[in-house]
Image (spheres, rainbow, N blue to C red):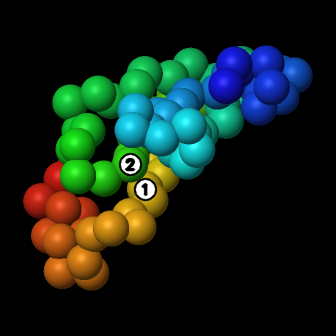
Amino acid sequence: MHDNIVGFKGFNIIRTDRTDSIHEGVCIYINNPINFTVLKDLKDPSFETIRVKLRPARLPRSYSSMVVGTLYHSRASDLELMEYLSTTE
């Protein structure tokens, strides 16, 4: 599916589509003025996940950026999910 079908005007879309199916996947919408970097080194083939480092114009002084993520786990056990979340930073 092309980005213009699921995209919204004024937003960037970051997607991870499934390769073994025409359905499913995860995405994050980011407002156009916000600078971002996709953190590809945090990907795990066992989970559908996206993590993005955001640098919005306004944050508390002690923070230069924030990390936002989305995760979907239909096939993983709760134990596998908790292990994945506790070992990735």
Q: Secondary structure at mark 1?
A: strand
Type of residue at label 1? Leu
> Where does residue 7 sit, x and y in percent of width and height?
77, 27
Q: Is residue 24 above or below residue 71?
A: above
Residue in the image at 43% along x and 56% along y: 71
> Where does residue 10 sit, x and y in percent of width and height?
83, 21
> Where does residue 35 sit, x and y in percent of width and height?
56, 19
Q: Is residue 37 above or below residue 22?
A: above
Checking the image for residue 61, the label placed there is none
| For residue 75, side relative to residue 53 (left or right) | left
- Outermost residue on the front side: it is 21
**Residue tagged 2:** 48
- Number of marks present in the image shown: 2
C-beta proximity under 8 Å, tags 2 and 1: yes
**Residue tagged 1:** 71
Q: CA distance from mark 2 to mark 1?
A: 6 Å
Residue in the image at 48% along x and 52% along y: 70
Foreground pick, 61 / 42:
42
Crowdedness near tag 1: few (<14), some (14–19) or many (≥20) residues, C-alpha within 10 Å: some
- Outermost residue on the right side: it is 9
Foreground pick, 85 / 46:
46
Q: Quadrant of residue 45?
A: top left
Type of residue at label 2? Glu
